[in-house]
Amino acid sequence: MKKLQRMKGAARSVAVAVAGAIGSVSAFAQSTGSGSATPAFSDTAILSSISGVTPIIQDVGLAVLAVVVVAWGFKVVKGFIGR
């Protein structure tokens, strides 16, 4: 009897998970509307903003990496001198 109840509980859990997955997929599905090829959301401003910020992010990353390398170099030299 307990095994049957566990199976029913598992089946109910799977049914809830499937319903949630279907709901999620349907919420994110894009409809074409009247068949026009023009998207409802234009991402050109976002992409140009990201393209403009990319060199700055790379420069900051290189600066952080340079600081780490210098600190590691000091540690290595200090280890050699300390012997």
Image: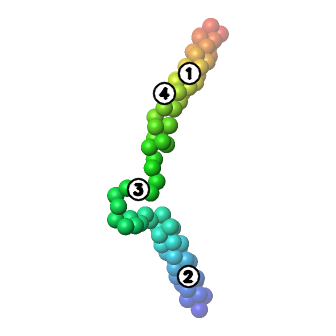
Q: Residue at x 43, y 63 (%)?
A: 30
Secondary structure category for the residue under label 3 = loop
In 3D space, how far apart are the residues under numbered discs 3 and 4 (Cα atoms)?
29 Å
Mark earlier in primary sequence (2, 4): 2
Q: Identify the mark at residue 55; answer none if there is no mark.
A: 4
For disc 3, the marked residue is 39
Q: Residue at x 37, y 56 (%)?
A: 38
Q: Residue furthest top?
A: 81
In 3D space, how far apart are the residues under numbered discs 2 and 3 (Cα atoms)?
39 Å
Residue 51 seen anywhere in this rendered image of the structure: yes
Amino acid bearing label 3: Pro
Mark earlier in primary sequence (1, 3): 3
Task: Give coordinates of residue 16: x percent, y percent.
Answer: 55, 77
Q: Residue furthest right?
A: 82
In 3D space, how far apart are the residues under numbered discs 1 and 3 (Cα atoms)?
39 Å
Q: Quadrant of residue 75?
A: top right
Mark earlier in primary sequence (3, 4): 3
Q: Mark 2 against mark 3, which lies toward the viewer?
A: 3
For disc 1, the marked residue is 63
Identify which residue, 20 or 81, lies in the foreground. Answer: 20
Mark earlier in primary sequence (2, 3): 2
Q: Mark 3 against mark 4, which lies toward the viewer?
A: 3
Vertical side of 33 occupied by 68: above or below: above
Amino acid bearing label 4: Pro
Q: Residue at x 65, y 10 (%)?
A: 82
Amino acid bearing label 1: Ala
User: Which quarter of the image is occupied by the N terminus?
Assistant: bottom right
Say whether marks 2 and 3 touch (CB < 8 Å): no
For disc 2, the marked residue is 12
Say whether marks 3 and 4 touch (CB < 8 Å): no
Q: Residues within 10 Å of mark 3 (few under 14, many from 20)?
A: few
